[in-house]
Structure formats: structure tokens, C-alpha cells
Image (tube, rainbow, N blue to C red):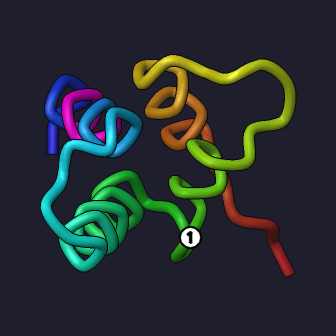
Amino acid sequence: MTRAAAVVLVQKIMDMDYAEDAEAYGVLEALDRALGCPTGYVSDLIFWPKGPEPTAAEVVDQALEYRPFAG
């Protein structure tokens, strides 16, 4: 998934532009997978941001910066 496509999908979620919750969950899961994040990471960035509400592009950039902890 390109960054631009991810931004469009995040904006769709932020605008609540979906017919059913199941559609939103599917989009969020696809974003987590495509951006290499753990399940729920992108939704946390959208719905529970640390600080001011981010733009869709900022959410995608933050997700792309995610790096798992080395155990």
C-alpha cells in the first residue's frame, strides 16, 4: 500500500465515512498490516492521539515510524 493510499483510508476513518463498524475494523486491520504495525496501533493513533488531533498524513507518518521493541 502506498503512503497516499494509506492517507486516503485514514481520512475515511477519521471522517467516519463507512457504512458499518465492520468496514472500519477491516480498513484499520488492513492499515496495521500494510504499515507494519501491531493490531490496533493505527486506531490508537487516530482515536487516542498523544497531543493534538493529528491529520491523516501525520497518522500514517507516525505509523510508518513504528519500530517493534527488541526483546
- The image quarter containing residue 70 is bottom right
> Which residue appears at 70% of the width and 64% of the height?
68
Q: How many marks?
A: 1
Relative to 71, say whether 47 is above or below.
above
Seen in the image, is 58 located left or right of residue 26? right
**Residue 55 is inside the magenta segment:** no
Residue at 44% across / 33% down in the picture? 60
- Looking at the image, residue 56 sits to the left or right of residue 23; the answer is right
As shown in the figure, which amino acid type bears the numbered disc 1? Gly
Q: Position of residue 61 (x, y in %)?
A: 50, 27
Magenta stretch, main secondary structure, is helix
Residue 4 position in % (x across, y down): 19, 23
Looking at the image, the residue that sits furthest to the front is 19
Task: Tell me the quarter of the image containing the C terminus.
Answer: bottom right
Q: Which residue is mark 1?
A: 40
The answer to which image quadrant residue 62 occupies is top right
At which x and y percent is residue 50?
Answer: 84, 35
Please name the residue shown 65% across and 55% down the image. Answer: 44
Q: Nearer the viewer, residue 53 or 4?
A: 53
Q: Residues within 10 Å of mark 1 (few under 14, many from 20)?
A: few
In the image, residue 49 above or below residue 67: above
Give the left or right position of residue 48, taking residue 36 as reference. Answer: right
Q: Is residue 7 magenta?
A: yes
Q: Is residue 35 above or below residue 29?
A: above
- Along the viewing direction, whichever of 2 and 59 lies nearer the viewer: 59
Which range is magenta?
6-10
In this rendering, is residue 33 above or below 53?
Answer: below
Kind of element beneath mark 1: loop
Percent x, y of residue 29:
34, 71
Q: Quadrant of the N terminus?
A: top left
Q: Residue at x 20, y 30 (%)?
A: 8
